[in-house]
């Protein structure tokens, strides 16, 4: 089974449509420079309407003030913290002592799977690299590199340029724990195209059932929230 995370949620309509379609996690962006930025209070109003088994994930970019991060986690009632910037392994380990953590790694032309173990987080997310951009680019990278990582990282999340048209191929090649989409199902930044989002989730779930990838879950272990 492949899990599906819909990122860049900014409104209740998109959130509930994603849940109804079968999304396992929703991403809320707390990076002020993002066009999908959402205030913690508004995120909380959405999160309070989610079923208990849909995971709310807070996306942070180069937020090194742990107390500031803690305030957002508490105010928004997040279950998982996603570090999507240039955070070094030592800082990621600090955050993982307090919350469940997804660390995003931006992939250009090469990646060493062995070096990723230094992060000691609960899941790794691979995204396409673009100078000065922290996610939401809609660009894909070499999935062959992701396949190599998936062999050694059981909770690998694949992102970067995914869409309803290519997600089945990506799952068959990489066999990830989960897939993450934002721009590939948007009508415009911050607003989902509901039909494309439903199609993405349906295709990903169907492809995941065919592949039956193994992997532990993000609900296992981790620090206190």
Image (spheres, rainbow, N blue to C red):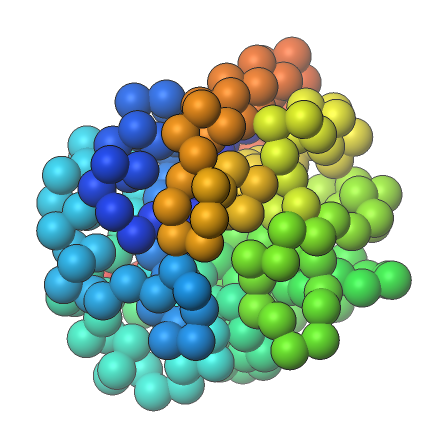
Indicate the quadrant where residue 69 lies. bottom left
In depth, the one of 45 and 99 nearer the eye is: 45
Residue 224, how many percent across, how many down? 25, 61
Q: Is residue 156 above or below residue 18?
A: below
In depth, the one of 143 and 102 nearer the eye is: 143
Q: Is residue 170 above or below residue 126?
A: above
Residue depicted at x 34% and y 56%: 28
Residue depicted at x 48% and y 80%: 62
Position of 54 compared to 90: left or right?
left
Residue 210, how many percent across, how many down? 65, 12
Residue 1, how many percent across, how many down? 53, 22
Residue 122, how many percent across, how many down? 48, 54
Residue sticking out furthest to the bottom: 65
Residue sticking out furthest to the front: 188
In depth, the one of 55 and 169 nearer the eye is: 169
Position of 191 compared to 162: left or right?
left
Residue depicted at x 30% and y 52%: 10
The answer to whether residue 114 of the structure is visible from this angle is no
Position of 103 compared to 77: left or right?
right
> Where is the C terminus found, in terms of image quarters?
bottom left
| Count of numbered circles on the image | 0
Residue depicted at x 37% and y 23%: 22
Q: Is residue 61 above or below residue 155?
A: below
Position of 98 compared to 72: left or right?
right
The answer to whether residue 184 of the structure is visible from this angle is yes
């Amino acid at each position: 089974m492949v899990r599906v995370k819909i990122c860049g949620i900014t409104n209740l309509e998109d959130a509930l449509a994603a849940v109804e379609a079968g999304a396992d996690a929703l991403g809320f962006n707390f990076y002020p420079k993002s066009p999908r930025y959402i205030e913690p209070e508004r995120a909380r109003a959405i999160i309070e309407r989610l079923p208990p088994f849909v995971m709310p994930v807070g996306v942070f970019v180069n937020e090194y003030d742990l107390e500031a991060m803690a305030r957002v986690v508490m105010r928004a009632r997040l279950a998982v913290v996603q570090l999507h910037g240039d955070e070094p392994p030592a800082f990621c380990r600090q955050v993982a002592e307090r919350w469940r953590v997804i660390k995003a790694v931006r992939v250009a032309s090469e990646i060493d799977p062995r070096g990723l173990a230094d992060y000691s987080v609960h899941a790794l997310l691979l995204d396409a690299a673009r100078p000065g951009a922290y996610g939401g680019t809609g660009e894909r990278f070499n999935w062959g590199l992701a396949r190599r990582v998936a062999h050694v990282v059981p909770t690998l999340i694949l992102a970067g340029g995914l869409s309803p048209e290519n997600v089945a191929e990506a799952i068959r090649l990489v066999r990830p724990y989960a897939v993450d989409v934002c721009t590939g199902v948007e009508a415009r930044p911050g607003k989902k195209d509901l039909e494309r989002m439903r199609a993405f989730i349906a295709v990903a779930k169907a492809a995941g059932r065919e592949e039956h990838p193994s992997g532990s879950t993000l609900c296992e272990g981790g620090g206190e929230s």
